[in-house]
Amino acid sequence: YAQIWQIKIGRISLYALDTNISKNTTEDRDLTDELYGGDRETRIQQEILLGIGGLRALEKLGYRPTVFHMNEGHSAFLAIERIRLAMKEYNINFWEAIELTKSNNVFTTHTPVPAGIDIFNPDLIDKYFGHYYDLLKISRDEFLSLGRENPKNPKESFSMAILALRLSDFVNGVSKLHGKVSRKMWKSIWRRVPEDEIPISHITNGIHCRSWISHDMADLYIRYLGPRLLTNPGDQTIWKRVEQIPPEELWRTHERRRERMVAFARRRLSEQLKKRGAMSSEIVFADEVLNPEALTIGFARRFATYKRSTLIFHDLERLAKILNNKNRPVQIIFAGKAHPKDSPGKELIQEIVQIAHQEQLRRSIIFIEDYDRCVSRYLVQGVDVWLSTPLRLEEASGTSGMKAVANGVINMSILDGWWDEAYSVETGWAIGRGEIYDDINLQNEVESNAIYDLLEKEIIPLFYERGRDGLPRGWIKKMKSSMMSLCSIFNTNRMVREYFENFYLPAFNRFTKMSENKAEKANELAEWKSHIKSNWDKIRIKSIKTKAPKQISVGTEFKVKANIFLDSLKPDDVQVELYFGSVNFQMEIVDAVTIPTECKTSDDSGNHTFEGKITCKKSGRHGYSLRILPKHEHLNNFFETGLILWSE
């Protein structure tokens, strides 16, 4: 049993499930006590409660959603429950119900590393879903295959992410780079499909501007950009007006927020020392740390090893010289928490605290404990530079830097997550050029030196070079450029609009079509897929002939003719394409375009002739291949079946 809590957030209702009620056993009462708590068995229980219990709760409340959006694989069991309910409601079988329900399932993956995916032993799936095998009228192997990279491997564990991938027609990563990483990460599910065509797209995360912009900055924005900014932050024409903000007003506003942040940091540090029972001299010293006029760097986020919070400490002697320059001082404020069970993350925090206590650094480096939204707001609104140092390809998106940008703070980051698509020389600083080394020690060496070089040669001079009026006009110019270029893009208004246009509306329309006439089209698609899969191994590419001149110049067009044996399949069941592009040194086709062919002739024995035209639009070494894909009007994309046949 679970009771439902309703939390009103403006006009939106958030519903939460709570098992801490007297009807339940002690074990079940503790189920919602701690996020990510317990062992693997507790984890699968929580995910059953979230996915299946969440769906049943919505039913009890009278909600019938038209689109289901799974954020990460934790809620993926809802797809199984939806299948069960669809079988009952539409009187259809399991495979038909899959085609119906996946049509309006959206899956967003948030992790770029396999270690972040929940995986369960088949015995555990048997324990909790054994009765579902009968309810769904499928075999154990058929159920387990839904969560396996290789459906036919009985030794493979059950992955929640793979389950969500297989049962969703719309899948995305949370930044452009993360979409690319996700396609590489899951390419084994779509065997022989080129990596850039794997059906995983991206929608980059954004931030809710009104929640993170300081009152001072909001007043400034309204005065010069107009009140529409707060209701429509995705309008780029509004952000262009940042140029009209007088430099002195923008800088004075920013300085006030830095002063408030320093005062807040001193107060919190003093409270931390009192809690620890520190000596009175240490507590008094807390009032002297930090300089409200010094260049201030902020680093605040969840502490995980891949985020490399201590990278800037790689050469403490060099860092100390940078921080302790009397004429151009620099200071760093750290804040954040580690996962309760992440011991390495906790050790990073301990290391920072120890370094911050060193005599040469104690006035310039502090760590603020008990990280929460309040601490985060002070930092993203008050620092000058926002530092982010993840291992490249391991930060899916990141949003703290977006919050900083909206407040006029400039980013200095590894080219990962959102910053890989946001960075330009006008908007901030990139640590390195996106290189990845096999040796992590070399990676840390190169990128820490890049941080020091940026600080010494670019960031510090730009901050401290002042005109007669005391304004760092070069710095202000970079602040404005960053705000004008990035704020209209990296916000939730743009993000939600993209989800609606790219996923929610197409998913709603697709489900509407698939559910008509007692799911007639879902039944048709399931039956067609079964026919295709049972006959796919019989098709053959018998020959390919090309009438191309020996000397090909730019603009030349030539025909390619293929003789293909489809056995019992019809020409309308397949898409025969020419895969044409440049050839690299490994003799691989890159930057390819696909050219559809037409069926020209057919005979009764299953032989068909397809023909297409290739136009050579640029010089260089080029090549082509021919491939066959399943085709049906109700398929969401050509690759969803995972079937593909290439010419040798």
Image (spheres, helix red, strand yellow):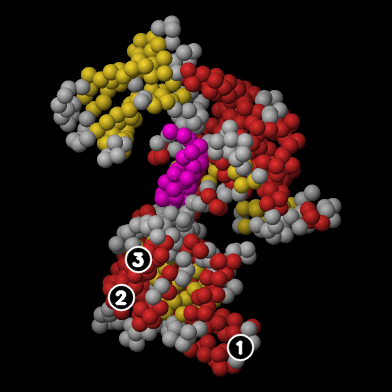
Distance in Å between CA atoms under marks 3 and 2: 15 Å
Q: Which residue is mark 2?
A: 456
Residue 446: which disc? 3
Q: Which residues are magenta?
A: 170-192
Q: Residue at x 71, y 53 (%)?
A: 42
Residue 511: image quadrant is top right
Decide which of tag 2 and tag 1 comes sooner along the chain. Answer: 1
Q: Residue at x 68, y 58 (%)?
A: 37
Magenta-colored stretch includes residue 177: yes
Decide which of tag 3 and tag 2 comes sooner along the chain. Answer: 3
Q: Is residue 645 left or right of residue 79?
A: left
Q: Is residue 360 left or right of residue 462?
A: right
Local crowd at mark 1 within 10 Å, few (<14), some, or many (≥20)? few
Q: Mark 1: which amino acid?
A: Ala
Q: Mark 2: which amino acid?
A: Glu
Q: Mark 3: which amino acid?
A: Val
The mark closer to the camera, 3 or 1, is: 3
Residue 628 seen in the current view = yes
**Residue 378 image offset from top left, x and y in percent:** 50, 73
Task: Tell me the element at label 3.
Answer: helix
**Residue 462 image offset from top left, x and y in percent:** 29, 74
* Nearer to the camera, 170 or 222: 170
Task: Tell me the element at label 1.
Answer: loop
Magenta-colored stretch includes residue 489: no
Distance in Å between CA atoms under marks 3 and 1: 38 Å
Tag 3 and tag 1, C-beta contact below 8 Å:
no
**Residue 466 image offset from top left, x and y in percent:** 28, 80
Q: Residue at x 49, y 21 (%)?
A: 536
**Residue 273 image offset from top left, x and y in percent:** 59, 84
Q: Which residue is mark 1?
A: 278
Distance in Å between CA atoms under marks 2 and 1: 35 Å
Task: Tell me the element at label 2.
Answer: helix
